Amino acid sequence: MADLFTRNSVPLMDVQCNWDDVIRKPGAKFWVSCKRRGEGTVHGTLCCPSDGTHIDNCFTLTSVRQRAITVDCSGAQYSATFVCPTKTLQLHDGKLLDMDVSPSGALGVCASDNGRLWIWDTDTGENRRILEGHVMDVLTCHFFPSGMVVLSSGMDMRLRIWSVQDGSCPRTLSGHCGAVSKDGTARLWDCGSGQCIDTVANLDCPINSCSLASSALACASAKEKPPEPECGTSDKLLLLACEDGSARAYDVSSRKLLSTFGVGNQPVTTAAFISEDGILCGCEDGNVVKFDLRKTSESISSYTIGAGAVCSLLYMGDGRVVTGHGKSTSSPNIWRQSSLNPQSS
């Protein structure tokens, strides 16, 4: 696997976060940078000229539209399109650690490092509810399919189930012996009673993220209907991104480990399903690796995106993938997963 990460190296281009404000001011400049793994970062400054093009160092501003610009970097033979946000919301004064949007798109929830969660209106940005109960950082938050219930997990070793309507916490799930899943366990819970039904995985390394999806691979291994109160697990696969440099796929119903995918000695920081039998793994060293769930011997493709850790992956369902890179860049990036060429950031 020595050449796994050298086959493709994709630069990561970054831009000043308020470029869309700066570009409207005559003569004002904003910075731009480009980084390829193993090479130094190239820096430059650009402004919006009257003829629509501007060159600085090896950067060229090739296109200026109402809400987007395209920048070429000749040194890296690379081009990226940057799209400005439609709205900026100041939701709270803590550090944003996670967020989710309800299935209807009407509400959002965000988790912070001060033990609180905020429910907010995605149209106006108005805070609807503040959810208090966690101690220390709230690591993750997710809406239930109904959009009226939120699940959160924290550094306090607990998961909490919240009512969006009144902000109450009817259930607290206790059982982890460390920050949720950092203790190496993936657990199946009965939300009604708050009891742990079973431990699906018990690893000797921290679990950095998990993803759940329906798959015929799970159906093939399921032998019988699970006993009550367990339900809805017969076709589910659980994908775990692990600190030991592996991603592991479990059949939730049978609790069996179906596949293990190795990416080397770098932690897998995040993983996501891109099809019924395809997954992407994001790594601490900036690699994104594609695997086929049916073939664990080798990866389909591997790309290095910039130089920082890939902190999050989101498959958009139309062939595009969103990657977040923590402190290494100020913006998320959108890529075509077929070639991993950048679409916007």
Image (spheres, rainbow, N blue to C red):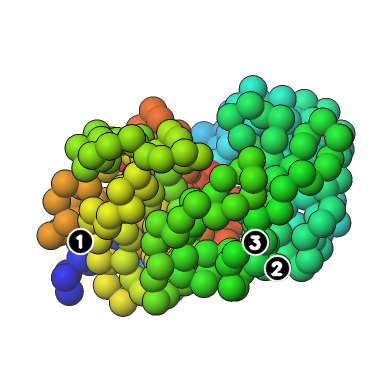
* Amino acid type, label 3: Ser
Q: Where is residue 43 in the image (x, y as percent from the top left)?
A: 54, 64
Left-right relation of 75 to 94: left
Q: Residue 1 appears in which quarter of the rendering?
A: bottom left
Question: Residue beneath label 2, please?
Answer: 156
| Relative to 235, residue 193 above or below | below
The answer to whether mark 3 and mark 2 are in CB contact below 8 A is no
Question: Who comes first in sequence, dot 3 or dot 1?
Answer: 1
Q: Position of residue 26 (x, y in %)?
A: 76, 41
- Per the model, the C-alpha gap separating discs 1 and 2 is 41 Å
Question: Who comes first in sequence, dot 3 or dot 2?
Answer: 2
- Per the model, the C-alpha gap separating discs 3 and 2 is 10 Å
Task: Identify the mark at residue 174; answer none if there is no mark.
Answer: 3
Q: Which residue is located at x 72 percent, y 48 percent?
A: 171
Q: Is 16 in front, or is 313? A: 313
| Residue count near mark 3 (Cα–Cα under 10 Å), binned few <14, some 14–19, many ≥20 | some
Question: Residue beneath label 1, please?
Answer: 7
